[in-house]
Amino acid sequence: MRWMERRPIGRRGMASGLLRRPLAWAASALLALGSFAAPRLGATPPPEAIHVATFDSGFGGYLTAKSIEGTAASLLRDYDTTITIHHYGDTKNLPYGEKTPGQIATLGSAGVLKAFEQGADMVFIACNTASTQYARIRRAVEEAYPGQSKPVISIIDVSAGEAKRLLDQALSHQATATFVIMATPATVRSMVYPRQLAALYGLPLAEEAPKAFTQPRWYRTHGATIDSLVQTSAIALPDGRRIEIHQLAPANWVELIEHGADPKAKREAVRRDLGLLVPRLAKAGGADVVGYFCTHFPIFDADIHAEMAVQLPGHRDTAYISQGQLMATIFRRMAEERLKGHRREVPIGADQLRELVASARATITISGRNGAVTRELAHTMFPNDPVPAVTEEDLGTLAPQVSAPK
């Protein structure tokens, strides 16, 4: 069933400029987002509909969808618009973090194209691993929709910029700043975040090879063991200051979330994997900035904070990067530009606003058969919200396509 059929409220396409970098490219997109057909003289124009999608390898991107949802109430109050939000999670093919770059590009392209096929105006790639193949995904979209504006927004550049801002704050009063990246094995191996950060400073990056720590696998369907990775790199600033970067790819975490592990198993995984990282942080006195650069990992936020307090007692204050909120900020800028000329002249009634806000609640499509676990996760993370509608639908495959016999 097409998404437009599931959510019938307001379904007009949105013209948008091509986003080639999440922040820099947003400017060109904003210029184009306001175009729409002029209504007939005397007719009441329909609300301007905004249809946004998020894509991830699993549930984690739903947190980004909920952050975007958090901007909806004020937009619906101030502008004559309808907003729908839909998250696509490729749970059948997770974890992406253990796949090759080519496989990640294939699956990421299929998921993003599915969102556009079902009516999305723009797609936010909330998956850091998929974002490492952004150029190939973007090319697939351009080939599928030649000459059309189909904005695809990646999280990597935005997150690296936020990390630099926070590290600069730390370096304003200390000689060394410590940055921790928690991501999937594919993201860590790609070195995309340390290299992007070094590029922002215009300086070389000193890299060490990642070290693997083989551990028992919790979800045995994918094998008996799994590797956690730890990798260290550094940026030497000209004035003697220094940035130390420690990357951790924790084993099991994504599968623990997606396949419904009990809280004890989750806490044990966090304790074990942080134990691989803490000895490196102890020498630096802790971490100044921690980036959850897998959208699943904020689900472990409370466990991570608690375990860091145990393993690094008395460590200095740490800033944590929330990627979902960064994406929501970009969405809001785009929406406000799109809605110029649609500001409400008459305040909206409370009942109508509640109805519009309810229609903007994020829904979910997953490719696996874990709908019940997905609904339970959503309820656990957002206990005060209605449990979202969850649809199971194929989003793409790595299997070779077999031609039908003639």
Image (cartoon, rainbow, N blue to C red):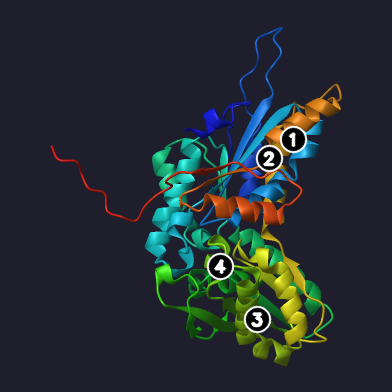
Q: Earlier in the sequence, mark 3 or mark 4?
A: 4
Mark 4 — residue? Answer: 256
Mark 1–mark 2 CB contact (< 8 Å): yes
- Give the amino acid at mark 2: Arg
**In the rendered picture of this protein, how many numbered marks are placed on residues?**
4
Q: At x 27% / y 53%, what residue is drawn?
A: 400
**Residue drawn at x 43%, y 58% as measured from the top left:** 93
Image quarter (top left, top right, bottom left or bottom right) of the C terminus: top left
Three-letter amino acid code of the residue under disc 3: Arg
Name, please, the residue furthest toward the top. 42
| Mark 4 vs mark 2, CA separation in Å | 26 Å
Vertical order, 92 against 241 (above or below)? above
Q: Nearer the observer, disc 4 or disc 2?
A: 4
Numbered label attached to residue 213: none
Residue with the mark numbered 3: 271
Q: Which residue is mark 1?
A: 357
Amino acid type for the residue under numbered disc 1:
Val
Where is mark 2, residue-wise? 361
Q: Is residue 343 visible?
A: no
Q: Cβ–Cβ below 8 Å for labels 4 and 2?
A: no
As drawn, is 231 to the left or to the right of 361? left
Dividing the picture into quarters, in which one does residue 105 lie? bottom left
Residue at point 51%, 53% (across, down): 370
Q: Quadrant of residue 312?
A: bottom right
Q: Residue at x 43, y 72 (%)?
A: 220
Q: Quadrant of residue 103?
A: bottom left
View extreme (left): residue: 406
Q: CA distance from mark 3 to mark 1?
A: 39 Å
Q: Tell me if residue 178 can be seen.
A: yes
- Mark closer to the observer (3, 2): 3
